[in-house]
Amino acid sequence: MFIPAKSKDGAVTPWEYLPCSAITPKVGMALVQSSGNLAIATGTTAPTYISMAEKESALAAGDIIPVIRVEKDVIYETTNSASFAAIKKGDKVTLHASDGLQVTATKTSGVAEVVDFDEAAASGAGGKVWVRF
């Protein structure tokens, strides 16, 4: 999940309430607007929103959920789906191909700039990674 970790001025990002597509939102899920509804941001699609809703089953298209807008001065904490052995700070990586909850180690057409990562991320999947969009 993408959770705000640091901001330039320390301000709290306000929540917005927007309609979603037929998705099962999770707190920290990367989202984009598509045809008037929020959809999961994956791969090379940079997110514009982060979900603040947690549901166990898919919502109906048009259901309203709380989100925060992605800000360029905010650093988000997430996890990696593959080893960061070849990743360096400043590299841009893609978002996980299906869940919008973590980053990959793929640099081609990356959208999430790696600010930092821990030793667990350097050696395998599931470590802590800090990114900005």
Image: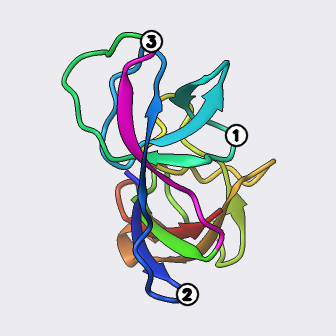
- The answer to whether residue 114 is above or below residue 80 is below
Which residue has dot 1 on it?
A: 45
Q: CA distance from mark 3 to mark 1?
A: 21 Å
* Residue at the limit of the structure toward the bottom, as seen here: 9
Q: CA distance from mark 2 to mark 1?
A: 24 Å
How packed mark 1 is, by other alpha carbons closer than 10 Å (few <14, some 14-19, many 20 or more), is some
- The answer to whether residue 98 is above or below residue 52 is above
In this rendered view, identify the residue nearer to me: 30 or 67. 67
* Badge 3 vs badge 1, beta-carbon distance below 8 Å: no
What amino acid type should be assigned to the residue bearing mark 3?
Ala
* Foreground: disc 2 or disc 1: 2
What amino acid type should be assigned to the residue bearing mark 1?
Thr
Which residue has dot 3 on it?
A: 61
Which residue has dot 2 on it?
A: 8
What amino acid type should be assigned to the residue bearing mark 2?
Lys
- Residue positioned 37% across, 51% down in the render: 1
How packed mark 3 is, by other alpha carbons closer than 10 Å (few <14, some 14-19, many 20 or more), is some
* Foreground: disc 3 or disc 1: 3
Relative placement, left or right, of 53 versus 92 is left
Q: Is residue 66 magenta?
A: yes
Q: Is residue 22 magenta?
A: no
Q: Quadrant of residue 107?
A: bottom right
How packed mark 2 is, by other alpha carbons closer than 10 Å (few <14, some 14-19, many 20 or more), is few
- The answer to whether residue 76 is above or below residue 15 is below
Quadrant showing the C terminus: bottom right
In this rendered view, identify the residue nearer to me: 85 or 78. 78
Residue 41 visible (yes or no) = no
Where is residue 131 shown, x and y percent of the image? Answer: 56, 68
Relative placement, left or right, of 121 versus 132 is left
Where is residue 5 shown, x and y percent of the image? Answer: 40, 75
Which contiguous range is marked in magenta? 62-72
